[in-house]
Image (spheres, rainbow, N blue to C red):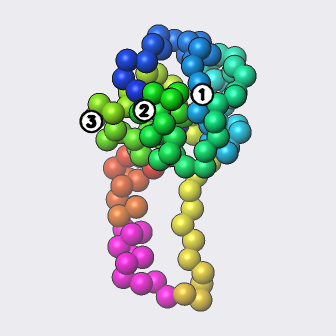
Amino acid sequence: MTPFCMPGTDLQTPANLSRHTLLRSYRVDEWPAWFAQAGERCPSLTGPVLDSSIGLGDLAASGFGVALLPVPMFERHVRSGRLVRPFATTVTLGSYWLTVPKERRMTDALVTLLDWMREASSRQGSLE
């Protein structure tokens, strides 16, 4: 995960983030972990809390603040110019799991999804 914001946001160093609204997810440890990785003290976190990376990305792209987002999920937003990634520092906090109960059979759709996820993660090293 790394900060994303709208183009033109004045961010020269991680310390400059203290002048901006930091959009937050329900995972309270994300911003403190990112600031620790960047070698900075985490400012007071008072920005809005959302439970959706998509929602956080939309708010950041609209200029409502800076969102900490998974890099692979938002690379196309950077390529399109909708968001910028002002810093190279990233932090990885946890993983995603896809589980299927043993008593359920694997459908063709699920097998296709699993194959796609494996291919995507091997291309990128991880899906973060």
Residue 100 in picture, x, y percent from top left: 56, 77
Q: Distance between the residues labelled 1 and 2?
A: 13 Å
Residue pictured at 41% horizontal, 69% vertical = 114
Is 85 rendered above or below residue 98? above
The amino acid type, in three-letter code, at marker 2 is Ser
Question: Who comes first in sequence, dot 1 or dot 2?
Answer: 1
Which residue: 54% across, 66% down?
98
Q: According to the image, label 2 marks what residue?
A: 62
Q: Is residue 78 left or right of residue 9?
A: left
Q: Where does residue 93 sit, x and y in percent of width and height?
A: 62, 42
Lateral position of residue 56 relative to residue 40, left or right: left
Say what amino acid the circle numbered 1 marks. Leu
Judge left or right: residue 37 versus residue 85: right
Residue 105: tell me if it is visible: yes
Q: Which residue is drawn at 51% across and 12% down?
A: 13
Residue holding disc 3: 80
Q: Residue 49 carries which label?
A: none
Helix, strand or loop at label 1? It is strand
Disc nearer the start of the sequence (3/2): 2
User: What amino acid is found at the position of numbered circle 3 in the picture?
Assistant: Ser
The residue labelled by disc 1 is 22
Is residue 4 at all visible to an observer of this figure? no
The residue tagged with tag 3: helix, strand or loop?
A: loop
Q: Nearer the viewer, residue 116 or 59?
A: 59
Q: Look at 70% across and 37% down and name the residue there.
A: 29
Q: Give the alpha-carbon distance from disc 3 to disc 2, as whole Å.
A: 14 Å
Residue 25 x, y percent position in the rendering? 62, 42
The question of residue 112 being in magenta is answered with yes
- Which residue is at the front of the view, 9 or 38? 9
Evaluate if marks 1 and 2 touch, with contact meaning CB atoms under 8 Å apart. no
Where are the magenta residues, as a range? Answer: 105-115
Q: Earlier in the sequence, mark 1 or mark 3?
A: 1
